[in-house]
Image: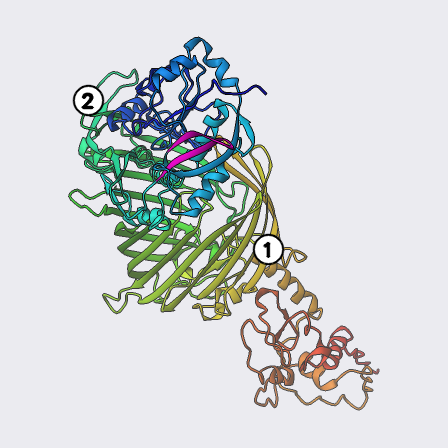
């Protein structure tokens, strides 16, 4: 390598303007003109982002971003931004370092150098270079004998840790190595890149051992305090926690860059228009943060027609504005604005809703304009038809039709009035409903609803399917008023007062008080029951997703205004919780309730059906004063919009079926508990979610039998068990008259009972005694009958219509139905003798007249 006697080094530090954007001519700020031809910015990226404009005024990034941003909801469809959506990415970047440094070397004429630096310290030599030869000098290498890191005054650093950080950052600058200007410049940026130094200046010193390269650095101050201005919604605890780890330590620019990014990220995650617009390190180690937040200046409502032209709206602007959670003076949030658009669209009287934010002049605030396209008419007439759950039978089972007259925007206040009529094969509902979703002048978002209803529904849920021509329907006349409002986030409460008159009717509409089995249908014993119910309900929903977490607790309390009115308390609770298990979703549901007091049987809790225990008919498991139903379901995607499900349900009346007035479950032989399981397919169609399920129950081997079939079966069995002819009611035994001596008495048939036969066949007019019941009948009357229970020894099973009546007069289960399995009191031998005597009467020969 050639000697470097004609090469001199000169070093200079450059203080960059704090937080100014990179510019092609920013190196012209250097005091020396020779740096104009040298690339001062690093050719490789720093290990951190430094392209953030801290001098950016808030109104600049607001206008830059809002020109193309708007929230539009049309026909109920919402365009949701992706999770990685960053609205500020095009406006500002992450913060830069506070300063940088550069190093340059230029080859020049020695004479010029000596004239320029004559009289200077011989240990320092300077070098000048023509602009045309700068590139050649950059590639020329200089042998370095020693590399040191010192303070800007040339003294040793107080902290050896900082010296070690700077030395570890060096890559090319090593002792006994030949370096170029470019390699030294890159090592300068690596030292600055550690984040601990405010400036770095390389100095070349000529010694007897060679050229010594000294990096003179200026460390940052120790962090001693924080001042944050303009942060109105940013939690102070969040800022304190972000800076807590660096207190009392040298300020690290890399760490400060991360903290500022976290603060900006806090605003981005919440969709707030806010950012850190300035950072300054004051004397004494105080860091000053300047935060800019865009507040809402004004909210305007603009009605448009289908073509987008301004028009006069029917809805009052105040009714729309009170739906918004975004208020004047708040920091504008895009997430909150999106939620407000959805709320206005949910009013049901809009076809299109959009919110457009715009800068409010030079104030740094935002003006919001909400464009509304209303529906043509707030009212109308609708009709429809369909098939309901199969709780009735017949060729038109479950077929229903409906018609409604409605108005969804009364007086321009979003009040709703609805008159509807629904008619089915048996049931019918006529209802008048008025709803005010937000009472005028109330700041708690209280709603009010009034209702009058006349309904007639089948009583099969509790009283089961009756035999032919014995259909029971429950008629109700209801009137009430309810008030509801949200009292906490995701919590809603409702209170109300409802009057109800309910009674049972037959298929012709005539009031009845007992069903086919003799069970009462009302609690008062009259044709109807009157009750005044105070209702309280609390609902918790995590989100609007049908499978999200939900909790519902309601209570009805009967108020006995008069002694004839019913007084009872009914509590019911439902809970739902979902869990994600990989691609599958596991949903658990639990419900339960209890009734205390005097209540009509049709108000009992029915168990079984599509909304309870699948695999059973509606109310087929039981109906009790108490109940618990649990359900578990796993759903998993299959293909496209089709998903599958596996489910299992269990329900029980907790043994309370017999405590319901009249025990309707026991009379119909309901098990009181049962489970079901099955599979299903769900399709998300344009018409809505469609679901097909196939379920089994724990009684699947025994097909359900309707009460009419059971009654016919019992009648057939009793007919088969009877003897060919019914035993006549016999008179007391009469003495048998002796035939005349000349007529030989016929011998009675073997095995016959002459006393019974004579007493049944002959009617003697002489000598009658007091009648006494048959001995068999006496034995039957000895044991009292217990309804719907097996009379077997030690067996108390419910039998209902499924019981078997023995000839002794008792009812038994399938296990004790035979006479050898219970203490049967019927005398089969005596009955057989009587049957034989009837079929083989005594034959008497006619008298022979002698001549």
Where residue 418 appears, x then y in whole percent? 29, 38
Q: Which residues are magenta?
A: 200-219
In the image, taking residue 72 as reference, residue 731 lies left or right, namely right
Is 203 placed above or below 788 here? Answer: above
Residue 27: which quarter of the image? Answer: top left
- The residue that disc 2 covers is 312
Q: For the view shown, which residue lies furthest in the left direction?
A: 441
Q: Judge depth for marks 2 and 1 and give the one in front.
A: 2
Q: Is residue 745 something that shows in the picture? A: yes
- The residue that disc 1 covers is 676
Q: Secondary structure at mark 1?
A: strand
Q: Residue at x 57, y 70 (%)?
A: 798
| Labels 2 and 1: the sequence-earlier one | 2
Q: Residue at x 18, y 27 (%)?
A: 363
* Classed neighbour count for the residue bearing mark 2: other residues with Cα under 10 Å, few (<14), some (14–19), many (≥20): few
Where residue 693 appears, x then y in whole percent? 58, 44
Where residue 818 appears, x then y in whole percent? 71, 74
Residue 63: which quarter of the image? Answer: top left
Q: Residue at x 30, y 34 (%)?
A: 337
Disc tally is: 2
Q: Secondary structure at mark 2?
A: loop
Magenta stretch encompasses residue 648: no
In the image, taking residue 640 as reference, residue 205 lies left or right, namely left
Q: Quadrant of the N terminus?
A: top right
Q: For the view shown, which residue lies furthest in the right direction?
A: 851
Is 11 placed above or below 420 here? Answer: above
In the image, taking residue 566 as reference, residue 185 lies left or right, namely right
Q: Nearer the viewer, residue 624 or 842?
A: 624
CA gap between label 2 and label 1 equals 58 Å
Q: Which mark is residue 822?
A: none
Q: Quadrant of the C terminus?
A: bottom right
Kindly check if marks 2 and 1 are in contact, taking CB atoms under 8 A apart as contact: no
């Amino acid at each position: 390598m050639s000697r470097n006697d004609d090469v001199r080094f000169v070093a200079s530090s450059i203080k960059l303007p704090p937080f100014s954007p990179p510019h092609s001519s920013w190196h012209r700020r250097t005091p020396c003109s020779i740096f104009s031809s040298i690339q001062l910015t690093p050719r490789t990226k720093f290990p951190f982002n430094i392209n953030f404009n801290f001098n950016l005024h808030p109104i600049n990034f607001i206008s830059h971003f809002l020109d193309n941003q708007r929230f539009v909801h049309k026909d109920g469809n919402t365009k949701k931004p992706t999770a990685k959506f960053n609205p500020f990415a095009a406006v500002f970047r992450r913060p830069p370092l506070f300063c940088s440094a550069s190093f340059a070397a230029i080859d020049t004429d020695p004479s010029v150098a000596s004239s320029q630096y004559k009289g200077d310290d011989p240990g320092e030599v300077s070098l000048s270079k023509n602009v045309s030869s700068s590139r050649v000098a950059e590639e020329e290498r200089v042998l370095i004998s020693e590399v040191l890191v010192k303070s800007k005054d040339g003294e040793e650093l107080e902290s050896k840790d900082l010296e070690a950080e700077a030395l570890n950052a060096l890559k090319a600058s090593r002792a006994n190595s030949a370096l170029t200007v470019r390699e030294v410049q890159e090592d300068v940026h690596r030292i600055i890149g550690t984040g601990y130094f405010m400036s770095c200046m390389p100095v070349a010193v000529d010694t007897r051992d060679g050229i010594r390269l000294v990096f003179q650095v200026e460390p940052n101050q120790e962090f001693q305090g924080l001042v944050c201005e303009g942060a109105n919604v940013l939690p102070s605890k969040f800022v304190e926690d972000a800076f807590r780890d660096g207190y009392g330590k040298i300020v690290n620019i890399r760490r400060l860059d991360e903290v500022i990014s976290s603060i900006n990220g806090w605003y981005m995650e919440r969709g707030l228009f806010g950012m850190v617009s300035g950072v300054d390190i004051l004397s004494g180690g105080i860091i000053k943060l300047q935060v800019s937040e865009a507040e809402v200046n004004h909210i305007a409502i603009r009605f448009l027609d289908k073509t987008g032209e301004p028009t006069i709206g029917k809805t009052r602007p105040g009714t729309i504005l009170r739906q918004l959670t975004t208020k004047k003076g708040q920091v504008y949030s895009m997430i909150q604005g999106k939620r407000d658009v959805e709320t206005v669209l949910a009013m049901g009287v809009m076809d299109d809703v959009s919110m457009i934010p715009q800068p409010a002049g030079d104030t740094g605030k935002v003006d919001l304009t909400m464009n509304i396209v209303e529906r043509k008419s707030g009212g109308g007439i609708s009709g429809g038809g369909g098939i309901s759950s199969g709780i009735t039978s017949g060729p038109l089972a479950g077929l229903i039709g409906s018609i409604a007259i409605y108005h969804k925007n009364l007086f321009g206040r979003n009040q709703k009035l609805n008159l509807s009529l629904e008619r089915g094969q048996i049931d019918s509902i006529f209802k008048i409903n008025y709803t005010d979703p937000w009472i005028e002048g109330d700041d708690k978002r209280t709603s009010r609803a009034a209702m009058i209803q006349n309904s007639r529904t089948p009583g099969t849920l509790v009283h089961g399917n009756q035999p032919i021509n014995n259909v029971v329907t429950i008629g109700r006349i209801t009137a009430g008023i309810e008030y509801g409002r949200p009292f906490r986030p995701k919590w809603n409460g409702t209170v109300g007062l409802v009057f109800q008159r309910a009674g049972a009717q037959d298929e012709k509409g005539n009031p009845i008080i007992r069903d086919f089995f003799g069970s009462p249908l009302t609690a008062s014993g009259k044709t109807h029951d009157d009750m005044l119910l105070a209702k309280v309900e609390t609902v918790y929903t995590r989100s609007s997703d049908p499978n999200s977490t939900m909790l519902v607790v309601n209570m009805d309390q009967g108020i006995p205004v008069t002694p004839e009115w019913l007084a009872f308390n009914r509590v019911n609770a439902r809970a739902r919780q979902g869990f994600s298990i990989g691609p599958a979703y596991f949903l658990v549901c639990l419900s339960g309730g209890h009734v205390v007091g005097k209540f009509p049987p049709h108000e009992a809790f029915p168990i079984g059906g599509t909304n309870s225990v699948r695999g059973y008919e509606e109310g087929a498991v039981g109906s009790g004063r108490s109940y618990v139903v649990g359900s578990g379901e796993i759903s998993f995607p299959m293909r496209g919009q089709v998903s599958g499900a596996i489910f299992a349900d269990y329900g029980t009346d907790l043994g309370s079926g017999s405590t319901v007035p009249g025990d309707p479950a026991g009379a119909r032989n309901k098990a009181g508990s049962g489970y079901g399981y099955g599979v299903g397919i769900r399709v998300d169609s344009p018409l809505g979610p469609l679901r097909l399920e196939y379920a089994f129950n724990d009684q699947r081997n025994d097909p359900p039998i309707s009460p009419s079939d059971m009654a016919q079966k019992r009648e057939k069995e009793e007919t088969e068990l009877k003897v060919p002819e019914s035993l006549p009611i016999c008179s007391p035994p009469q003495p048998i008259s002796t035939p005349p001596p000349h007529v030989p008495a016929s011998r009675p048939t073997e095995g016959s009972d002459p006393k019974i036969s004579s007493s049944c066949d002959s009617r003697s007019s002489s000598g009658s005694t007091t009648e006494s019941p048959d001995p068999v009948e006496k034995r039957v009357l000895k044991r009292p009958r217990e309804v719907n229970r097996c009379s077997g020894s030690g067996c108390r099973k419910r039998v209902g219509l499924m019981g078997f009546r023995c000839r002794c007069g008792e009812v038994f289960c399938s296990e004790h139905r035979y006479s050898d399995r219970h203490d049967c009191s019927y005398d089969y031998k005596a009955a057989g003798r009587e049957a034989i005597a009837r079929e083989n009467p005594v034959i008497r020969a006619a008298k022979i007249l002698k001549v």
